[in-house]
Image (cartoon, helix red, strand yellow):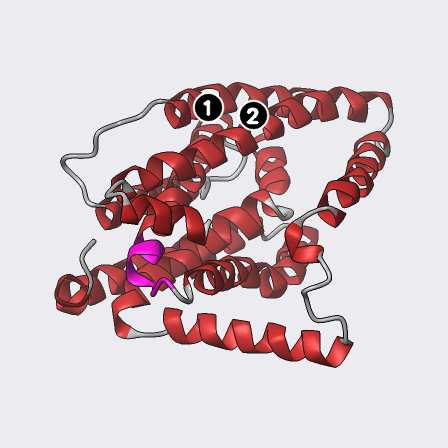
Amino acid sequence: MRYLFDYLKTHKLDHIWEYIARRKQLILRIGGTIAVFIGGFLYIWNVRLPSIIRGVFFLLAVFPLLRMKFMDSSQPTHIKEASASYVRHIWTGMRELLNRKMLPTVLLIFTIQGVTASIFIGGILRPLMIERTGLPIADQSNYLAIVSIPIIFLLFRRFKHRLLSPYGRAILWSVCVIAGFALNIPSHSLVSGLLGITLILFGNYFITPATSVLINKAASSEHRATTLSTASLLSSMPYIVAAPLIGLAADKNELTLVVEILLALMILAVLISIIAHKSYGDREVTI
């Protein structure tokens, strides 16, 4: 992806990067929608079938991965050498990310993106919150598939962003996610809960392209790929801490407390991000 952005920038086409990033999200969303719809019916037949089928497809994915260029003989073969290279790349990515000009974006990646992508969608929070609304299990996959239809449509459309900068759009979708969690504070509210989950899904799939634009424009060309991969790592880190706590809270029927804590953290992060952006963001990086 680094080389693609550099190519676009060289040909003065970097303004369409967010559109390309949305197309990536579109492909992921179409695949996810089909998987959720089929997985729901498989679950009705046998609760183990979705996990078995998912595992089979993961195994099948190994074959194209083995043919990718980064797996060739030019890569480090010695374990110690490979480990050192990995640590060095992560450190380089951290240096690029953890500076003042990137702070507003990093806060959104670590909190908003981290909560929605790794804790909510990739983790156990979404099924727990959907179950909490009272929606029957048999209808949950249908609900997620139906919600994905307008998301796919909007991802497919190419909009000319004239009113908001990429950072402004990132804040807009962050507020969308925050509103979604706020609507899920009331317990066992079907309409409010499902509307909130819908807003969270919308926010998640649109904030990623916006933050990708910010990282690509702020990171140096030499370390852009490393910075992007490190940002992806940062967005996954909150789940490591949150997963056991969410499971414990669910066992004690305290899921509302989890939603409230996450909501407070996201609001605080967005406020600090906006303050930091107004303080020095515009002077140090053009977004």
- The residue drawn where x is 58% and y is 41% is 126
Toward which corner of the image does residue 245 lie, by quadrant?
bottom right
Toward which corner of the image does residue 210 lie, by quadrant?
top left
Which of these two is toward me, 129 or 83?
Answer: 83
Is residue 11 found left or right of 280 in the rendered image?
right
Q: Disc 2 versus disc 1: distance between alpha carbons?
A: 7 Å
- The residue drawn where x is 53% and y is 18% is 146
Residue bearing the label numbered 1: 152
- The residue drawn where x is 49% and y is 23% is 147
Circles 2 and 1 in contact, beta carbons < 8 Å = yes
Asked whether 219 falls inside the magenta stretch, the response is yes
Q: Is residue 163 above or below residue 139?
A: below
Q: Position of residue 225 (x, y in %)?
A: 47, 59
Residue type at mark 2: give it. Answer: Ile
Is residue 166 found left or right of 239 in the rendered image?
left
Which residue range is magenta in the image?
214-221
- The residue drawn where x is 18% and y is 57% is 286
Is residue 25 found left or right of 266 in the rendered image?
right
SS of the residue at dot 1?
helix
Which of these two is toward me, 43 or 58?
Answer: 58
Residue bearing the label numbered 2: 30
Graded by Cα atoms within 10 Å as few (under 14), some (14 to 19) or many (20 or more), the crowding at tag 1 reads many
Judge whether residue 267 can be spotted in this image.
Answer: no
